[in-house]
Image (cartoon, helix red, strand yellow):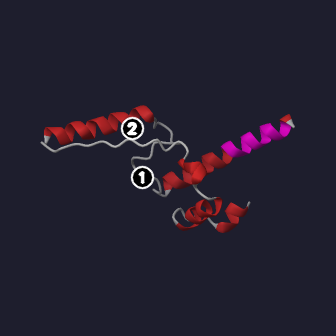
Amino acid sequence: VSILSFLSKFLEKVILAQLNLYLSSNSLLGEDQSGYRADHSVETLLISMFDDVLQAMDEGDVVAVLLLDMSTAFDMVGHERLLEDLCGDFFIHEQTLKW
């Protein structure tokens, strides 16, 4: 059982690395995407957002910030919908997803 756990974790890391390489090399991630990316974190996102707010205020713009807790949002997305988006929006081949 422990070998299977190790192998599944190892395979997960390999697949994640390949997927991240594919998404970044094909510019499929937005510039503001911070999750699951190297050199990106909540801190870098907050610094970027804070800088945008300050720039807008310096220009005399009104600034409003809406913060949403999306921690359970992924759990609510249907598996089929997720697979459709991976095929359609990110050009992941359907045969790859079946694997």
Q: Which residue is drawn at 59% across and 66% down?
A: 84
Q: What label sits on residue 56 in the rendered view?
A: none
Image coords of residue 32 (percent x, y): 39, 46
Asked whether 4 falls inside the magenta stretch, the response is yes
Check disc 1 and report the residue beneath it. Answer: 30
Q: Earlier in the sequence, mark 1 or mark 2?
A: 1
Highlighted magenta segment, given as a residue range = 3-13
Image coords of residue 34 (percent x, y): 45, 42
Q: Is mark 2 on a helix, strand or loop?
A: helix
Relative height, residue 57 to residue 91 (above, below): above
Q: In this view, does 63 lie to the left or right of 45?
A: left
Check disc 2 and report the residue beneath it. Answer: 45
Q: Which residue is drawn at 22% across and 36% down?
A: 54
Relative height, residue 84 to residue 44 (above, below): below
Asked whether 61 falls inside the magenta stretch, the response is no
Q: Give the prevailing secondary structure in the magenta stretch.
A: helix
Q: Check disc 2 and give the amino acid type.
A: Leu
Q: What element carries label 1?
A: loop
Q: Which residue is drawn at 66% across and 67% down?
A: 94
Q: In this view, does 59 lie to the left or right of 47?
A: left
Q: Which residue is drawn at 56% across and 49% down?
A: 74
Image coords of residue 2 (percent x, y): 84, 34
Which one is in front, 79 or 76?
Answer: 76
Q: In which quarter of the image is the N terminus?
A: top right
| Residue extending farthest left | 60
